[in-house]
């Protein structure tokens, strides 16, 4: 949005606060991927629907891991507009306006979208790891960034494999009524 | 708003089991997400919320929520919501729809809902096109938009200016959000729901299928300088010189809301019939 984004400024001050941010990232990612899977399914794009469901499952599993880590902690309740996403792009915003999102998209494009989103999350953790005041927060952020790196590697591998068999977009049998 | 209160429900709890049939990448997904997060943040009980809509892609939204809902007639969401709110002022009544439903077919109702100032929140998902009927120009479409076979030379008509018209019709809360900024949109929706009167929120919500160029809105939207205006003259100046892409709470002034006097629970049918006897 022209370099502007909603959200609070300031650094993350506690492990609980960082975990709330991390949970928000994973919940939003899961919701976003589930939504894309559903709409792909309703547009008969079964291949990409299955891929988005897989991505949603991964995000839900990671949210589960984070919830386990947060067990016993008093988590702050943060308003949607008060998260401290102090990094380029807002990592919790599903990039619904990504140029490649469309009902005919193929696995390669879906994976590029996922990598785009996961990179923003990775940038967020790196930023916290480098700027948080509390060492324990920096340490957890670095750990979460490392998990994110693993996930990005997995996605990159998937993308490389899919790229080998990628084919042009299928013919649109019911195109939008454009001249 | 109390930001330390622990909500009893999460955003997902406000979603129904029905899956949206919107096109992949549709801005309405983000509006749905922003709304559920807002409801969760405000900790509104599901049985105290009613979401009313008309017809169109965006008007399908009540079906995707797990609260009371009514998918009504084209352009008639506001009259339905008005009746409900008059009868049940205790409910939080939210009205959702699109630019065609709200500003064309329901344009008359929009004007009078603004001036009546009943405590409703009206969310218009403005994609500047009739999407459900496959891409015709709507009241907010640019006059030179030529990508519809129905208007191959464009409409040639001035665009409807929802914010300015709402102001002229007497609305006290006017805001504009963007589907590409769901967190900012959540903030506007929270303020709108808490506003004690008619709150109008125009949401720029791109249509990936019939207005693919609307993806570029994310590079054109910007915060509204000088907003929110607190007096109508300043607000009019702001809205009439606005490029239509300025985001934020544009105008806010608390006006006396219309308050109905619902019947007492003890009223029986015979008493009602006696009142209406000729």
Image (spheres, coloured by chain):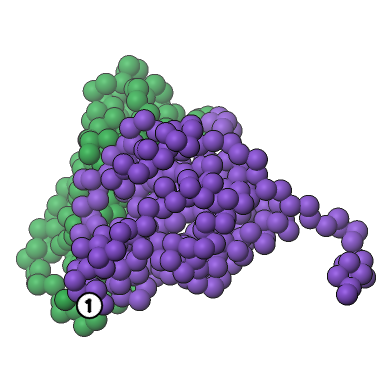
Chain colours: A green, B purple
**Residue B50: x percent and y percent?**
61, 58
Q: Name the side, left or right, on which A35 lies relative to A159.
A: right
Q: Dot 1 surroundings within 10 Å: few (below 14), some, or many (20 or more)?
A: some
| Residue at 86% over, 55% down | B264
Viewed as shown, does residue B160 lie left or right of B243? right
At a point 21% along the width and 52% down the height, the residue shown is B216
Give the answer, above or below, for where B39 lies relative to A22.
Answer: below
- Residue A138 shows up from this direction: yes
Q: In the image, B197: left or right of A149?
A: right
Q: Is residue B237 left or right of residue B5?
A: left
- Above or below for B109 versus B133: above
Residue that appears at 30% across and 72% down? B136
Foreground pick, B81 / B150:
B150
Residue B181, located in which quarter of the rendered image?
top left
Residue B187 in the image, given as x and y percentages of width and height: 45, 39
Any part of residue A62 in sight: no
Q: Residue furthest bottom?
A: A173
Q: Is residue A102 above or below residue A57?
A: below
Residue at the spot of label 1: B149
Q: Chain of mark 1?
A: B
Measuring 10% from the left and 68% from the top, which residue is drawn there?
A: A166
Quadrant in which the N terminus of chain A appears: top left
Quarter assignment of residue B57: bottom left
Q: In the image, residue A53 lies at what x, y percent?
A: 33, 62
């Amino acid at each position: 949005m022209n370099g502007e984004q909603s959200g609070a400024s300031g650094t993350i001050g506690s492990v609980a606060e960082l975990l709330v941010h991390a949970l928000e990232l994973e919940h939003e990612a899961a919701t976003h991927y589930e939504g894309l899977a559903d709409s792909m399914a309703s547009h008969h794009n079964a291949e990409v629907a299955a891929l988005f469901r897989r991505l949603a499952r991964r995000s839900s599993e990671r949210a589960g891991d984070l919830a386990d880590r947060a067990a016993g902690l008093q988590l702050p309740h943060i308003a949607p507009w008060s998260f401290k996403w102090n990094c380029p792009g807002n990592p919790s915003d599903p990039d619904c306006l990504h140029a490649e999102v469309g009902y005919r998209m193929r696995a390669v494009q879906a994976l590029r979208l996922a990598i785009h989103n996961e990179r923003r999350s990775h940038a967020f953790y790196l930023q916290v790891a480098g700027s948080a005041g509390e060492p324990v927060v920096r340490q957890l952020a670095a750990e979460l960034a490392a998990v994110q790196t693993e996930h990005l590697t997995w996605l990159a591998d998937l993308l490389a494999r899919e790229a080998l068999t990628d084919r042009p977009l299928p013919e649109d049998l019911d195109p939008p009524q454009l001249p | 708003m109390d930001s330390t209160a622990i909500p009893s429900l999460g955003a997902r709890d406000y979603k129904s089991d029905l899956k949206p049939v919107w096109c992949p990448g549709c801005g309405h997904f983000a509006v749905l997400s922003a709304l559920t997060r807002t409801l969760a943040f405000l900790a509104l009980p599901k049985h105290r919320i009613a979401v009313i809509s008309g017809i169109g892609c965006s008007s399908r939204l009540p079906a995707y929520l797990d609260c009371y809902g009514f998918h009504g007639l084209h352009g008639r969401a506001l009259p339905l919501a008005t009746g409900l709110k008059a009868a049940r002022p205790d409910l939080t009544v939210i009205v959702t729809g699109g630019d065609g439903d709200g500003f064309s077919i329901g344009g008359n109702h929009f004007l009078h809902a603004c001036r009546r100032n009943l405590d409703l929140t009206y969310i218009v998902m403005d994609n500047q096109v009739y999407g459900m009927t496959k891409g015709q120009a709507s009241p907010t479409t640019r006059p030179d938009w030529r990508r519809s076979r129905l208007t191959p030379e464009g409409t040639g008509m001035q665009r409807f200016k929802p914010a300015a018209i709402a102001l002229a019709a007497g609305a006290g809360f006017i805001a504009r959000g963007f589907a590409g900024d769901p967190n900012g949109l959540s903030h506007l929706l929270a303020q709108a729901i808490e506003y004690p009167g008619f709150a109008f929120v125009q949401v720029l919500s791109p249509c990936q299928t019939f207005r693919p160029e609307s993806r570029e809105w994310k590079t054109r939207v910007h915060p509204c300088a000088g907003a929110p205006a607190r007096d109508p003259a300043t607000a009019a100046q702001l809205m009439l010189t606005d490029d239509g892409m300025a985001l934020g709470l544009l105008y806010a002034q608390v006006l006396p809301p219309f308050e109905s006097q619902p019947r007492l629970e003890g009223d029986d049918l015979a008493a009602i019939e006696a009142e209406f006897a000729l």
